[in-house]
Amino acid sequence: LIFDTRYILNGFHIGRDLFVMELVLALGLAYGAAASFRRERANGAFELILVSPLSRREIVSGRLWALWSQFFPAALSLVLPSLWIARMFDNTAAVTWLWLHVGLVCSTFWSVPILGLHCALAGGSFPKALLNTCFFGVLVPLFLVNGVSLFFYRPATIEDGCGLAFLYQIVLASILIGRLQHQVVFRESRVGL
């Protein structure tokens, strides 16, 4: 993929291949985050975690760091070739598209675990948490990137859609990161602490 210049010059081929790899990464992140604390809740270990001397912030940040470190090599394998290709060629449209791809991978890598952990702690079943994470963390940004032209009077560009997807992911993750600690407090009160 990296050494075949026809993929670089033809944005459709590289875009399709990178899109599939990015979608697999996002779905893996969604699954891993939605499955968080599932086993611990099933066997009662979650109550033991809540009564441990760890603070709520340490519990939440530890789980997020575990998810991020688990998927970091996959995200890096998507970002580094794109940065190398963008540095290597002078085609401004391709370079712009590759930088947008890098931004989307980074914002997805940052926001989907936060959303998935929020859905996992919100209660309910694992399929519900997974579907909510996939819908709000993967499908909504995908729609914002590709379907944004429905809301503009002029033809929308990929930059418009990526900008909305970045903004959506950053705002959603920023709101939910604060709510995660409150969900752990809610779980503590249900345990009887």
Image (tube, rainbow, N blue to C red):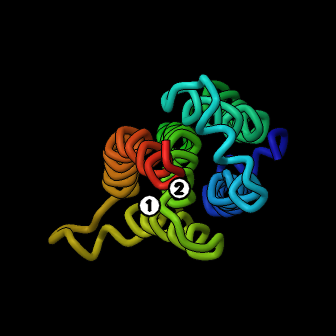
Q: Position of residue 11 (x, y in %)?
A: 61, 56
When the figure is inspected, residue 109 is found, relative to residue 43, above or below; the finding is above
SS under mark 2: helix
Q: Quadrant of residue 161?
A: bottom left
Farthest residue toward the left? 153
Using the image as rendered, state which of residue 160 and residue 107 is in the foreground: 107
Q: Earlier in the sequence, mark 2 or mark 1?
A: 2
Q: Which residue is mark 1?
A: 141
Farthest residue toward the front? 192
Using the image as rendered, state which of residue 138 and residue 50 is in the foreground: 50
The numbered disc on residue 160 is: none
Please tell me whether mark 2 or mark 1 is closer to you in this view: 2
Residue that appears at 71% across and 34% down: 66
Amino acid tagged 2: Leu
Q: Is residue 114 visible?
A: yes
Relative to 21, 101 lies left or right: left
When the figure is inspected, residue 145 is found, relative to residue 53, above or below; the finding is below
Find the distance from the CA under tag 2 to the CA under tag 1: 22 Å
Crowdedness near tag 2: few (<14), some (14–19) or many (≥20) residues, C-alpha within 10 Å: many
Residue that appears at 26% across and 68% down: 155
Q: Which residue is mark 2?
A: 121
